[in-house]
Image (cartoon, rainbow, N blue to C red):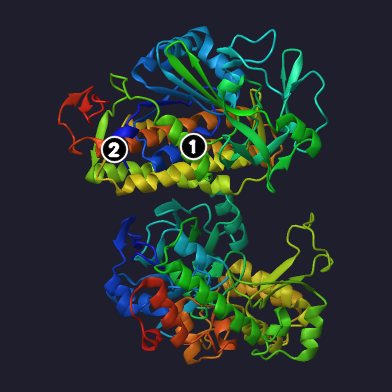
Amino acid sequence: MDSIARSQKIGIYIGKGASYSWIWFVKTFDALGFHNVYFIDENDVCEGVLRHFDCFILPGGDPFQVAEGLETDGLAAIRRFVEEGGTYIGVCAGTYLSIIFHDDPLPWLNFEKVPVNNFSLDPPEAIRMRYKYLVSYQDGYVYHPVRGPLRVTDGTTSFSAPLYGGPPMIAPREYIMLEYEGFEDKTLYLIEEDKAFETMVGYAAGIHIPVGAGQLYLFGPHCEHPQYPRANNYLNDVLVRITPQAEGPGRTATDILRGEKKKRFLKSVKRELSSARIIASGMTDLRWKIGEKIWEDEKITYFLTETWKTIKQLQKHDCLPVEGPSTLISMARRIHVLLSDIRTLSKEGRDTNTEAAELIDLTKLLSKGLFDCYFNYKRRSWMPDGKDCGRDYSGGKCLCMHTVR
Amino acid sequence: MDYLYTEYYLVVDLATGEAEEVELEEEFVQENVGGAKLNMALYEEHKDGDPVVLGTGPFTSTLVPGGCLGVITAKSPVTGNVAHAPITWNAGAELKLSGYSFVVIKNKADNPTYLWLHDEIADFVDASALWGKDVWETVDVIRDEQGEDRIQLLSIGKAGENKLSTAQIMNNYWGDGDRFGFGALFGEKNLKAVAVRGMGELDIDDAEAFIEKTEELLGKVKSALPGKSGLDAIDFADIPDDAKAALKSQLHRVEADFNNPFAYKFFLKYREDPSVMKSTDVEEPGVLISDPMGLAALLKAGVPADAVGEVFEKAFKLGLNPAAVASKLSGKDKDAALAELDSLAESSEAEKFEATFSPFAPSSDRMEAAYIAGICPVLASKVEALNAEMFAELMSIGTGMDFDADAFKM
């Protein structure tokens, strides 16, 4: 694998409104060899960090909450980033957020007018999963005809990719990269199959729009989902088109833990995270509405499981370049306590939305902290000599993050 | 050890509150294989600390049919010799997947303690508030404290706390195969319980060949089983037909261990209609019996068959071995028998009784091999294909190392 070709500096949005699907990007990027990956939130965007990135990814989630988090300044910073030559990749929520699909659009990114075929003033009747089938938008509704895997085609080949609310888009031919080609045995119909077919098939699943000096790549389905290797390869082909040119530091590690310190840190996080995932594994049929997004207990389990796997990988590294180790331990402890509280309150039939909202934020931050640690370490592997450069940087030993080319 | 076992085993010193992870070396496994045999080696290594060793076999928590077994090895207060007792159902499998294939528990804690093993973490938890609680309460409190109902508990009741040789180490709410008074050792050590939850994974050297072999073996196992389950399966225990018939009127369901095709355990309901299969408001509707020899002993002592369930329940709550106290119940009606159990658990006199290598199955080479391999000894006693030659072949495939049938002999 040509590692230099995968040195693009990528920022993944994990701030307010991002769901758990950003972890799919992490897994897939790692597998594809993209290790120059950073995680950024609404504050980072507003502070202007995007100028240090080649590519900004806005993954799945709740576009209303994302817009609320970014506010006017954050949205303007993203627009500026693209106009000045950056690449924006939107998936699902990240796609809705960036296009104009209504005559009176909400003040989102609104790069370009791209109608969607799943907006209606009078949507079809749901046949299942009513609780997550429909989202109101202005005078109408965005509805989700199907969920799960379906076929998409780039005109020459077709492959499977999963859809969890992303749009079928109506775009000029020159913009279209992928079209919805058909359904699969495992496609889950939320409306009658024939109506789902009419809404989806033949419409754009992926589009590419040049904006200013930059590019938009917008997808309905989740080509980043790690269980869809052909879709991942398609995403890879999009990413390698981006010329690495961003300069400046990403986030740096504040501590480099080795030996006993490393062992103690990981043990402390593991202790809390293990207890948390054990409690989570026993939860069933819990569901919370955070913003416009429905969260089920299995999403928490997914976060915890993936974070757990990351710890297992970190155990194998000879050192841990980590930002704020004591904060990460505290987060893990709080996650354990929150899950314990949710279990108790649920048994008593009480509402747990407040605890769940905090839990989701914290699991996201803890995952981010550990993935940061993982990629900080990995980034050394594609440096010319694969070693620390030895320079001091922001109070910690630099792991060559000052050289991002 | 890269395959079939976890990377580490654990040495717990209750006196110092320290838990040391020790790498499970290939050479050590090559020499001692696992289960009762490897436990024995660990016992010898740590015998100055009067250890209780909890261990698993190479096939515990794998797809090998009957791969459920954990083994407790310690010096028996009943016989004065080192002995082995089975851990059936799910606790053995969960122990290995908690990250520790073997746990050596040494010395005595200053205060009542329980060990909480999960994901390569060993926590010492204060059990002062649990001391004096019965086994069922203990299970409920620890599961609630740690937040999961699938946590597996090896614990003691009052009999163990009082260090009686009639005490058993209980498996969740129920009795298991401790015939050696190991419950008294937990009491001696101020150890109320060992709680485990296993969410780990195991690696197999040649996974494809291993699974192929286990599938082939499963076919043989199924064809060798008598097609019986529950009460009908316990044809090796001395239970009169009329007693079986009386018990059948309370029979609710049969149960199997982890990955065991032979469902020899059975649940009796006596506080609600046994045919009710849904969960109801009745909190303690009955009892799970996995101990046919204990059942036989109670019936032989004259405990009426329709009272056996409640006698088991009482014994289980107190952490008493029903087979060991059966003779004390001779000629008593239900209420008197229940009162006698209370009194026995409080007594300071240890009851003398005969301990046996396994409460479940007649002694045989196959059973010995099963105790080393981590296979349910009841199943092994029924199926000829579950023998040392087969285990050696499977272990060689699973580990990439060479084992012969002699390795599966003590």
Other residues around mark 1 within 10 Å, as few (<14) / some (14–19) / many (≥20): some
The residue tagged 2 is A377
x, y percentage for residue A233?
47, 40
Q: Quadrant of the C terminus of chain A?
A: top left
Of the two numbered discs 2 and 1 on the same chain, state the one appearing first in sequence.
1
Q: Residue at x 31, y 66 (%)?
A: B24
Labels 2 and 1 touching (C-beta < 8 A): no
Foreground of the two, A322 or A149: A149
> Helix, strand or loop at disc 1?
helix
Number of callouts in the render? 2
x, y percentage for residue B55?
42, 71
In this picture, residue A159 sits left or right of residue A11: right
x, y percentage for residue B49?
31, 69
> Helix, strand or loop at disc 2?
helix
Q: In 3D space, how far apart are the residues under numbered discs 2 and 1 (Cα atoms)?
A: 27 Å
Badge 1 sits on which subunit? A
Badge 2 sits on which subunit? A
In this picture, residue B347 sits left or right of residue B264: left
Given the image, on which type of amino acid does mark 2 rest? Tyr
The residue tagged 1 is A234
Q: Residue at x 74, y 67 (%)?
A: B286
Given the image, on which type of amino acid does mark 1 rest? Tyr
